[in-house]
Image (cartoon, helix red, strand yellow):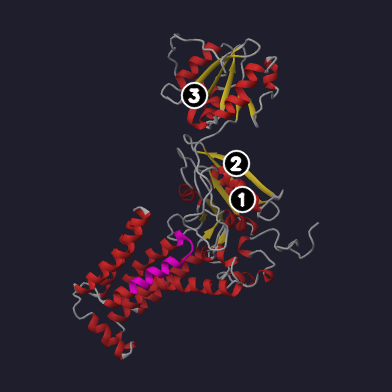
């Protein structure tokens, strides 16, 4: 590349106003003026690179890009080499003589600025009032690894990464079908985050796609940094404690939901995707359910629903029984609990709150510390604090057991967001039990149930298929029947093509 030369050295930069009026102006045919404009727009960008050189035709040209966002090898081999040694005329450049997969011709400074920030390279030629935008993205990215939160024993060990293009490719590998449609949007006035929705056009309900598009276009923010932020903007009931969208980091899980007639939202810069619409029962389904034999999967599914009830109500039931309904206990167990609580100076509600809060702090500390240290803190801290609290007479032995069972139950829930919501529900349930006993627990459960059946996710009832009842969907709710028995897609997703195995809604063969 010895023929690359530099022009304009020593020229003074002319101050210009970087206003919207400037960005909406077309580029100049004078290369010196274009260079001055670029230096003004990127005046405080030390990674902004300007490579000035001469084409084989003798015309002056500059290539500009942001150093950390491009593939330098592609620039040297596929752009500079052809321009300096191979191009016979300027017209050949606009006719795709450059060996880059995708190029585009733009004329406005606003398009040039956006392209540079996206990791593209811009070619400006003296005497030309248009520029060539070339896809040379090559920003730092991590390799595809196993998901950290949604681990599996028999399923795929590939997880999403922070690049939307790779995440879309991972889903495409599971669904190499022409009906898989992708629509792209840009959200954020500053971040310009690329958001893509994916769905099967012949399966998904068109109203869902239209509703998703409308909600995405209504998001007006500076930038979207991760899927959690976007989920808050597009969910139906942001005040509800229950998540109404599934955030998954598994491409096989995303593909499975697309096959059921749902929409996947891929957000650039985030290692997880959004799935909508969803129901309450969908949060208790795991990838391993479809890798294990159906009897084992059904047992695990029932175990999760037992864990749901245990997580919400076990501590509350203990408080209600000890405070109001101790007569329901066998005499031997009542004596044992009485002896355990003889030295405890607090009422059951204070005792339970202390232990539950201590458990949550230990759990949060274990997550924030490095892996080996976090595991040590979680195990040793729990044992030491629990034993010391019992010996000091602050809590009883039975309370430590109750809190431990509650914690284990919450960890069984496969979805992290749902597990966190259920853990928070323990506290109002404990307060209801302390005030009204078993009647308070029943009232609390009724309020939760009424709330679950009253909310929606993109127009779909959150309580479906339990409320409203759709018996055909129960094959994959409480238990998981054999795969060859599940011939229909779930009605809760309202698919336009109900039959999975090549049949339409009326049961006729697809053409």
SS majority, magenta: helix
Q: Is residue 57 magenta?
A: no
Circles 2 and 3: CB atoms closer than 8 Å:
no
Q: Earlier in the sequence, mark 2 or mark 3?
A: 3
- The foreground one among 470 and 509 is 509
Instruction: Specify whether 19 is left or right of 200.
Output: left
Q: CA distance from mark 2 to mark 1?
A: 15 Å
Camera-near label (2 vs 3) is 2
Element at badge 1?
A: helix
Q: Residue 373: percent from the left, percent from the top?
A: 33, 56
Q: Is residue 403 magenta?
A: yes
Q: Is residue 399 visible?
A: yes
Element at badge 2?
A: strand
- The foreground one among 43 and 241 is 43
Label 3, on which residue?
20
Label 1, on which residue?
171
The correct choice, above or below, for 316 with respect to 174 in the image is: below
- The foreground one among 393 and 427 is 393
Q: Earlier in the sequence, mark 1 or mark 3?
A: 3
Camera-near label (1 vs 3) is 1
Which residue is at 24% across, 84% downward? 338
Label 1: few (<14), some (14–19) or many (≥20) C-alpha neighbours in 10 Å: many
Label 2, on which residue?
184
Q: Earlier in the sequence, mark 2 or mark 1?
A: 1
Residue farthest toward the front in the current orientation of the protein: 2
Q: Is residue 213 visible?
A: no
The image quarter containing residue 111 is top right
Q: CA distance from mark 2 to mark 3?
A: 25 Å
In this picture, which residue range is highlighted in magenta?
Answer: 402-418
Q: Residue 57: percent from the left, percent from the top?
A: 66, 11
The correct choice, above or below, for 160 with respect to 128 in the image is: below
Label 2: few (<14), some (14–19) or many (≥20) C-alpha neighbours in 10 Å: some
């Amino acid at each position: 590349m010895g023929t690359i030369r530099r022009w304009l050295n020593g020229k003074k930069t002319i101050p210009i106003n970087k206003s919207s009026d400037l960005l909406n102006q077309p580029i100049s045919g004078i290369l010196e003026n274009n260079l001055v404009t670029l230096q003004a727009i990127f005046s405080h960008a030390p990674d902004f690179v300007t490579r000035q050189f001469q084409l084989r035709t003798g015309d002056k040209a500059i290539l500009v890009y942001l150093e950390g966002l491009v593939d330098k090898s592609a620039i040297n081999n596929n752009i500079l080499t052809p321009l300096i040694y191979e191009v016979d005329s300027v017209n050949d450049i606009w006719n795709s003589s450059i060996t880059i997969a995708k190029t585009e011709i733009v004329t406005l400074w606003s398009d040039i600025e956006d392209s540079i920030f996206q990791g593209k390279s811009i070619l400006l030629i003296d005497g030309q009032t248009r520029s060539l935008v070339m896809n040379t993205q090559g920003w730092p990215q991590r390799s595809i690894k196993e998901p950290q939160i949604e681990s599996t024993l028999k399923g795929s060990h590939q997880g999403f990464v922070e690049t939307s293009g790779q995440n879309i490719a991972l889903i495409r590998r599971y669904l190499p079908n022409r009906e898989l449609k992708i629509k792209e949007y840009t959200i954020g006035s500053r971040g310009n985050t690329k958001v893509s929705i994916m769905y099967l056009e012949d399966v998904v309900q068109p109203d869902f796609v239209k509703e998703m598009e409308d909600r995405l276009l209504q998001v007006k923010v500076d930038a979207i940094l991760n899927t959690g932020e976007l989920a808050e903007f597009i969910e139906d009931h942001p005040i509800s404690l229950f998540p109404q969208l599934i955030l998954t980091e598994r491409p096989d899980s995303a593909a499975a939901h697309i096959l059921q007639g749902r929409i996947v939202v891929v957000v650039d810069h985030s290692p997880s995707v959004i799935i909508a619409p969803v129901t309450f029962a969908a949060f208790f389904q795991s990838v391993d359910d479809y890798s294990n034999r159906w009897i084992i999967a059904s047992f695990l599914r029932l175990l999760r629903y037992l864990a749901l009830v245990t997580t919400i109500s076990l501590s509350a039931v203990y408080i209600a029984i000890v405070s109001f309904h101790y007569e329901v206990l066998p005499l031997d167990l009542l004596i044992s609990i009485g002896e355990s609580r003889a030295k405890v100076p607090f009422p059951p509600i204070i005792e339970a709150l202390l232990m539950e809060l201590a458990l949550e702090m230990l759990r949060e500390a274990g997550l924030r510390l490095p892996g080996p240290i976090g595991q040590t803190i979680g195990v040793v801290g729990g044992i030491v604090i629990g034993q010391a609290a019992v010996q000091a007479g602050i809590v009883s032995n039975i309370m430590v057991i109750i809190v431990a069972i509650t914690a284990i139950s919450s960890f069984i829930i496969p979805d992290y967001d749902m597990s966190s919501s259920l853990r928070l529900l323990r506290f109002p349930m404990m307060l209801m039990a302390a005030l009204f006993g078993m009647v308070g627990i029943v009232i609390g459960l009724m309020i939760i149930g009424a709330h679950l059946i009253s909310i929606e996710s993109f127009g779909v009832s959150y309580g479906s298929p339990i409320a409203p009842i759709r018996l055909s969907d129960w094959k994959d709710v409480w238990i998981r029947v054999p795969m060859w028995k599940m011939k229909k897609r779930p009605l809760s997703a309202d698919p336009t093509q109900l039959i999975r195995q090549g049949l339409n809604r009326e049961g006729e063969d697809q053409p």
